[in-house]
Image (cartoon, rainbow, N blue to C red):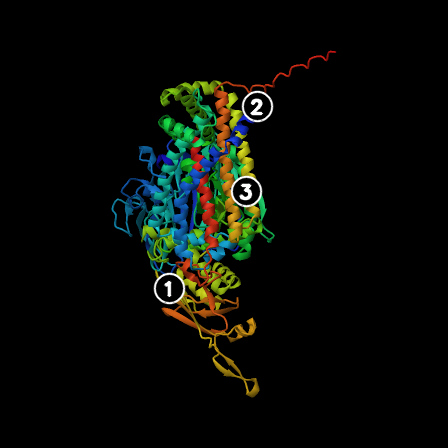
Amino acid sequence: MNKVFLFLSLFPALGFSQDKIFDPPLSPRIANYTMKAALLPDEKAVRAEYVLVWKNTTADTVRDLQFHLYLNAFKNNRTTFMKESGGRHRSGVSNRDQDGWGFIDIVSLTIPDGADLTGRIQYIQPDDGNPEDQTVIRVPLDKPVFPGSSVRILCTFYSKLPRVFARSGFTEDGFFMVGQWFPKIGVFENGKWNCHQYHSNSEFYADFGVYDLTITVPEGYAVAANGILTETQTDGGKTTYHFYQEDVIDAVWAASENYTRITDIVPVGKTARNVEVTYFLEKDKTSHAGAYRRIVPSMLQYAEEWISPYPYRNLCIVETPSGEGMTAGGMEYPTLFTTGQNIDIPGFELIGRVNWLELVTFHEFLHNYFQSMVASNEFEEPWLDEGFTSFMESRFLERYFREQNLAGDYGYILGAVINSVDFHRFAYLSGARSGVITQNAWANDNFYATASYSKPVLMLRTLQNYLGEDTMNLVIREYFKRWSFKHPRTHDFLSVLNEVSGKDMRWFTDQFLFSAKTVDYVASQITNNDETIKPYGWFGHRDEKKFSAGHAEPESADTAASERKYRSVVRVRNNGDAYFPVDILITFKNQDTVWRRWDGRDLYMEFHFHGASPVQSVHIDPYRKNLLDLNWANNSITIAPQSAGIWRYTTRLYFWIQSIFQKLSLFI
Amino acid sequence: MNWLNIQKDAWITAFTNKKIAGLLWLITLICGFPVMRLVHRYLYSVFGGTLVTEIWLRQFDASFLLEIISGKTPFLSLISAVFIAVLMIYGLLSVWATAGTIGWLAEPIPPGVSVNERFFSRFSHAGGKYFGPILRTSMITLSLSLLAVIFFFFGTAGIVIGIGMILLWILTSDVTKILLVRDGSRRAFITFLKSLPWVARHIHRLIPHYAVTAGVLAIGFIIYSVIDGALIADTGFKIFLLFSLQQVFVFFRGMARVQLFAAVVNVVNGRAAEPVKTAEIPLAAPVTE
């Protein structure tokens, strides 16, 4: 027996008998962990052991096991993660002190009453063949796991946490974000293991299970985890917390002696259930709970209306500390998510507002739905969780601030409203043709954010505009209902989309999901030909005949108008290689309007008009249903240009420039 | 109530010397014009024939600017370069104007010279004569202020310290400039160093004047903002009206700068406002038979 196991076994048997949370279970419960962990603050490490019960729910015989050792990504500068990221991630920079690196050492891996697998551990690199990368191991079994049977694994390990710069680790002031900290079994599907290396832009993929987690920390440390806190015991200078959770894909916890827990009971929308919401905050910042308290009821309500009622009994919000701790913020885990310190710039409220806290809180909470419950593969299809989460986040923000009569779901600055759509369009426009949404996380680093977040948001919102909000809500709800607690792929969502909408949307998804095609409609030309035939000659009968020389003034304005005849041609063009049906508004000089619809398949389209008034303006997609149009500025054209609109803002710009000059003159 | 009299005199000085404020306003107008014109021409070339301008008359929609910002770095680079260039030109003109202003307010009038000698010749003479020392003082102030910005990265306390330091440099800079002109000195750095302890000792006499000026400007800005918010500039006439209001505010800021200099000149010279002297009226001789 090694020292670690002896160390842990010295703790009094806690003897918890845990009541079931969900009956029947919400998920297949394939990977079930009973863990005991001890935080070693001086070593910046965790000593732990677990018993894993892994079930083979497939029709294939499994002869080996594969595990993720995510913390090994921070072991040295030659790992795949560090090479791809260059040591930079989430605005943080890796610390190269001896203490700053992280790793997992598996002390022992055994099958109780069976083989010792420790010596069989092999490091593999299924993605890039980098021999220095040790984030995936393969362990051949002496006895296969047959379909329907399970295997018990006892693992003792030592997890050295890195100085935090990419989600997990410790900060200099004693905050520990313990995420991706244990050897996590991969997902066996389609006859093989899906167990990718840890890449700079990838996240995670795991099966559902029950997590029974016991954490021991020095007395005085507060702990937050993604389970229900069932027991706390203090003895001999140590405090032991017991957390329990069912039907989740991960276990994560945070600890610090500078933190405290504040717990509220919040009703889940209009259901009869409540959820225990824990805010894990620095002791001198407990007032921050007020800000979250304003947001939490709305997010639970919106989720219930648009997706499904939140099913868990608990939710934990960890506000990471400022400075390097911010790189652990803005991260999602099942029933727990991290935010960060609201960025307060003194005096900024005079010129604007950034809805940072609402944005992060909604976004990370929504990951409970898209990632934690609809557990898609974040390695291979990151858009399925980030795209859907960002899409719903933008809808949540819009509604939240609309209900408060505040403009700008992302905020405003100097009077200019900033909306999520504008933000994502900016990201999309910066490299619209650089990649496709469905690329994997490490395929194209430069396009990862656009492919996973921004373009999916615009695509899904355009889809919503096309189908209508009610239909889109039905699609989302059905998608969640069918694929929660499962592992959907892109085609699973598309099947739901086509079925619920009653339309074959392949024309849309083939262009905007699976390809880098773009659409750019241009209102290119208005031509008005005056075909009025001025009267020359004799008109009328017998004695009433009158001669007109053509240049005579008309008898009345009405007569003039009725005699005018114009042949107008409006030409619109598609400069892109994708198409999307759009409505076109044509306005005539007499302010009459007509609508035309164009499917956009052809290079250009002409609309012809004959009437008493010439065409004055053309506006393609005036209600902006197609958010993927590369350029909205060229969607309209007018023969009566107004310069006042430009003068309005350039004079304001003039004033601002003068103001800047006068501020500078304080120093001169 | 000494400082009240100084304030009163300073405002009277500012109002009776509106030409100075006018000159300061004109400098900002001229220097800002190239940037404004460049932006206007570009926006017109992109949006002039579209309905975007009509939309902008109703409300500002920043989304159209994305098409300009995204992938249009040459335009942004040009506008940035022009802005930096005019900023530097403005800086130099402002140095000249500051020298002229302080010269007008603080330079002793040589014997035999009329106080009503032509404004522009006296102003520009002082502007040229003290350009060098004022420029050097400005460079010192700017450099020290930039160093003070480093404190901003050290939390709220750092921000407070940094702002305090910047204010100290501004006060010292103003006093230095006045001393340079009053004493006819050209030793900017030495004078700055000597002014620093003086400012520290007399800060209680200086701060109220800066506070009053800041307060007046704040009130002015609030009034402007209220009118700006109420006036929906959706026609050419209203746009012109708003522009005029903005220029009035810019002019007023220039006047406040003159007022502040006038007040600080009085503080530096240690002059309290002298009581108004009234001529003695002799008693009427008694009526005699």
Report if the CB atoms under discs 2 and 1 are less than 8 Å apart: no
Name the front one of labels 3 and 1: 3
Answer whether residue A55 is visible to the viewer in this image: no
Residue at 47% x, 68% y: name it: A615
Chain on which label 3 sits:
B
Task: Check residue B5 in the rendering and tell me which mark sits there, or answer none.
Answer: 2
> Label 3's element?
helix
Chain on which label 2 sits:
B
**Which residue reaches farthest front?**
B289
In this picture, residue A194 sits left or right of residue A531: left
**Which residue reaches farthest bottom?**
A542
Of residues A633 and A382, which is closer to you in this image?
Answer: A633
Q: Amino acid at mark 3?
A: Ser
Q: Position of residue B240 (x, y in %)?
A: 51, 49
Q: CA distance from mark 2 to mark 1?
A: 76 Å
Of residues A270 and A653, which is closer to you in this image?
Answer: A653
Q: CA distance from mark 3 to mark 2?
A: 30 Å
Q: Amino acid at mark 1?
A: Gln
In this picture, is B71 found above or below A49?
Answer: below
Q: Position of residue B38 (x, y in %)?
A: 38, 48
Of residues A569 and A583, which is closer to you in this image?
Answer: A569
Q: Position of residue A659 (x, y in %)?
A: 46, 39
Q: CA distance from mark 3 to mark 1?
A: 48 Å
Return the residue at label 3: B225
Q: Are marks 3 and 1 on the same chain?
A: no
Q: Quadrant of the N terminus of chain B?
A: top right
Report if the CB atoms under discs 3 and 1 are less than 8 Å apart: no
Residue at 25% x, 50% y: name it: A129
Chain on which label 1 sits:
A
Of residues A187 and A418, which is closer to you in this image?
Answer: A418
**Which residue reaches farthest right?**
B289
Task: Check residue A511 in the rendering and tell me which mark sits there, or answer none.
Answer: 1
